[in-house]
Image (spheres, grey):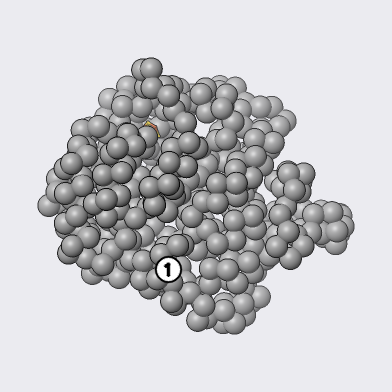
Amino acid sequence: MQRLTHEEILGWLRETRPAALDQLFAQADQVRRERVGDAVHLRGLVEISNYCVRQCHYCGLRAARSTPRYRMNREEIVACAHKAVELGFGTLVMQAGEDFGIEAEWLAGVIRQIKSETPLAITLSLGERLLDEARLWRQAGADRYLVRFETSDPELYAAIHPLRGAAISDRVELLRELRKMGYEIGSGVMAGIPGQTYEILARDIELFAELDLDMIGIGPFIAHPETPLGAPDVATAGEDQVPNSELMVLKAVALTRLVCPEANMPATTALATINTVDGREHGLESGANVFMPILTPSPYRQMYQIYPGKACVDEDATQCNQCLRGRIQRLNRSVGEGQGGRRSGGGEAAFGNASQSAAATKARQPLSDELGQKESSQPAEETLSQFVVLR
Ligand code: SF4
């Protein structure tokens, strides 16, 4: 596959013609089918703590915000792991704010217990912790680590992520260190951060490829209203501002699939939040191959409010599982078996159903119709000759 150039990525991010975009989505879907198969992997997400020392300007969990806090105990987390096995998931994702109340040795013990009692892969998403802590958790059996760099632009990153005292925040370097420890590494960005230009988002996508990420999550920027960026008069990049729309997220997902053909990519909860009806399906049709059903028990799941109105907060784990499996079935895709890691494999169901899925894709309405795009006078062929992905 020939790499997309910076100008090509930029052109696609600015593209608005429905017929052209349908070709982009179809091509991403085809690459997804050929490179990671039809299986949709289910990663059970357990939000183990909503404490956070950081002050990210958009997040409902920022330290300065007064909100009820919780930290799950060992028994509760291990119970979620067994629930994940019962529901047929291959991975448990433990996520939290940057909470140093989660002690490294304590968490290592939890990881060891889950690895000894279940066949699950363990993914950690605990923010910027010390390298020694990450090393300890890797030795205890953790398989993957997620840390979103959110934007590749250092100035934009600094503008919305105040530092923790004198600490240095370099998530890209952290990802490189985690890779050296043997973790599968995942990252991601938000589309539509105030001040984010198309140039910046194009560079984000190029950085995904440069880092050869194993997992990539892309969602729309959604600010909690009780945060600095939740104010109505926030400064933007004007005409160059990337919108935080579903369409923009889907374009970024599709382009990311083309430049990172083997990455595991979730249809994110944030995408499902801005389109509760079929945002997840649109994600799967644009290159994604992972769902992350929430396992966090009540009342904690209602307290993990990065932004309000989060999809799936009112359902329990069993309902989430049934709902997501139904969505996968309706797309004629299959549920992944095993751990479904990029490097560790476990995706034996991945390639079993390609022709069925291809037929289903053809039978579906063009995605641009579902997104309500206006038709343009320019023919799609012209776009393709300009931006075609040579394979
Ligand atoms: S985005 Fe993450 S690190 Fe930032 S305040 Fe929210 S939970 Fe903490």
Q: Is residue 254 at all visible to an observer of this figure?
A: no
Residue highlighted by disc 1? 345
Callout 1: SS: loop
Mark 1, ligand 1, within 8 Å: the answer is no
Along the horizontal axis of the image, is 176 left or right of 86?
Answer: right
Q: Quadrant of residue 364?
A: bottom right
Q: Is residue 265 above or below residue 164?
A: below
Q: Position of residue 327 (x, y in %)?
A: 45, 68
Q: Residue at x 22, y 39 (%)?
A: 104
Q: Residue at x 50, y 37 (%)?
A: 172
Q: Position of residue 68 (x, y in %)?
A: 22, 32
- Going by the numbered disc 1, the residue's amino acid type is Gly
> What quarter of the picture does the N terminus occupy?
bottom right
Along the horizontal axis of the image, is 14 left or right of 322?
Answer: right
Along the horizontal axis of the image, is 354 left or right of 203?
Answer: left
Figure quadrant, ligand 1: top left
Q: Is residue 161 above or below residue 220?
A: above
Q: Position of residue 382 (x, y in %)?
A: 87, 57
Q: Furthest-front residue in view?
A: 180
Q: Is residue 351 above or below residue 12?
A: below
Q: Position of residue 338 (x, y in %)?
A: 36, 71
Q: Residue at x 64, y 35 (%)?
A: 200
